[in-house]
Structures are given as C-alpha cells and as structure tokens.
Image: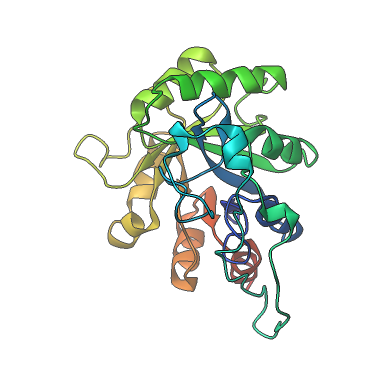
Amino acid sequence: MQPAVVAHRGASAHRAEHTVAAYALAIEQGADGLECDVRLSRDGHLVCVHDRRIDRTSTGRGVVSTLTLDRLSGLDYGSWHPGMPEHADDLVLRTPDESERGVLTLESLLELAKAHPDVKLFVETKHPVRYGGLVEAKLIAMLRRYGLARPKSKEDSQVVMMSFSSRAVRRVRGHTPTLPTVLLLEQLSVARWDGTLPMFADYVGPGVHLLRTDPDYVERARSFGYEAYVWTVDEPADVDLCAKLGVRYLATNSPATTRRLLNR
C-alpha cells in the first residue's frame, strides 16, 4: 500500500504554514492527513505555531507563551511567505488573503478536520514549554468536548497525538487508552535503535534523514508491531524510499507533488 500523505503544517510549500489557506489547500490537494504544532498562549489557548517565538512567521515579535490570544490574533501570518505556485507553469501572482491573517487556533483547525471525517489530524505538542503538561491536559479537554478523546479504537481515531517528548506522550496515554500516539525521533538512541517503543507509544516517528542512513529501521520497528510516521519528506528520492520501505504515514510540505510522485 502507498503511504498515507500528511500535510506538514498544511500545504506549507505553497501557502504560509499553520494558516487556514495552507490546510484548505492541502485538503484540495488530496491529503490524507493534516499535521500541526500546538503551543499555549499566555491566556491558555491552544494555538498552531511551530516556533517558540512568532518572529519568523508573523508580523509580530515575542514568545508565544507570553502573548494573549487577542494579541496573536491581530497579526499577519501570511505576508512573509512567497506563495509558491502549485505547478511550475502557474505564474499567477498571489497575495495573502484573510485566511492567512490571525493566529490559527487548534479549535478552528479541529472544526475544519471535523468537516472532512476521512482526513486525520496529527497534533504535535511542543516541548520544552513554560506550561509543561498543561498543553496535553488542554488538548485532551478539547478533544473530549468534540467526542474525540476516546475513540472506539486507535485505527478509528480521527486525531493522532505526537511529540518528541516521551513524557508528553506518556501523559496523553494516562488520559486516554485509545487515542493513538507517535513518539517522534530526531535521532536513534541505543534504547530505540532496535525498533522498540515505550508501552505508551503506538507509532515510531523518525525523520527521513534517519531512514537514509538506516533504512532497515522501519522493518525492525514493524517486527515489534510498530508502523512508521516519517517526517518531512519532500525530495523525490525520499518519497521513493518511504514507498519502498512501506512507511505508513508520510509528512510532506507539498501533498500534491508527493501524491504525483507516489502515483508514478
């Protein structure tokens, strides 16, 4: 089977990351899943921002955890992005619109995902952060309100939680036994090299750079019952590698391009 295509921060090669425009385009491009990063604002709202600071992706400055939702919502999150065309022959100039202004809240993204029940939402909680485990507690509380915190099975779940922090993944498992989790991996430690995971994690989450040097890792993990979520896969050779290895989920900045490569 082909890997499922997950839009990394939306169709972020073509639209500004973590904006409604990026996620709406990803759905149009046929993404099987949407990926986002979440942090807590000063007043306790889950917002979709990758960096600790907002300087790179907005017209403002400062640390996310020190800014209120009202302050974050008044900024432009789209003008920094060049708005690359979806196809090489598409020369239409694009300017940011309202769907790229104002910080994207997790609740708004969840509403978009709920409107497309066949699309999974992969939520990465960022650490270390000022508020620690409160991030996961807020995430689970929101999923409870939407009836998504305790799916009938992990396969049926529309939401998948992820983190590079094993403590964060363990906290989520403590809240719910059936919400699927991914332990993201920047490097393979001695403890993880054999493909095993702690009991509270369901999927291995290696960066594609790890598979370039150790492609057998996917099969080692599979021998223990763990499928792979691999990030961030944009280069044709990397897409081919993931397809060859039978990766379950493939996170990419350009879902349409990656889909075309998989269908070759």
Whether residue 31 is situated above or below residue 82 in the rendered picture: above
Q: Is residue 46 in view from this perspective?
A: yes
Q: Is residue 95 left or right of residue 59?
A: right
User: Which one is in front, 28 or 220?
Assistant: 28
Q: Which of the colour schemes (rainbow, by chain, secondary structure, one colour) is used?
A: rainbow
Q: Is residue 198 in view from this perspective?
A: no
From the top left corner, tell me how far across and down residue 143 is, in percent.
Answer: 64, 23
Q: Is residue 97 left or right of residue 245?
A: right
Q: Residue furthest right?
A: 115
From the top left corner, tell me how far across and down residue 157 is, in percent.
Answer: 65, 29
Q: Is residue 141 left or right of residue 165?
A: right
Q: Residue furthest left?
A: 190
At horizontal 59% and vertical 33% (from top left) the residue drawn is: 69
User: Which one is in front, 127 or 213?
Assistant: 127
Figure label count: 0
From the top left corner, tell me how far across and down residue 44 is, in percent.
Answer: 54, 23
Res 13 quadrant in image: bottom right
**Which of the image's four quarters has the N terminus?**
bottom right
At horizontal 54% and vertical 48% (from top left) the residue drawn is: 249
User: Which one is in front, 12 or 43?
Assistant: 43
From the top left corner, tell me how far across and down residue 19 is, in percent.
Answer: 64, 51
Whether residue 104 is situated above or below residue 14 in the rendered picture: above
Whether residue 70 is situated above or below residue 34 in the rendered picture: above
**Which of the image's four quarters has the C terminus?**
bottom right
User: Which one is in front, 246 or 262?
Assistant: 262
At horizontal 58% and vertical 28% (from top left) the residue drawn is: 45
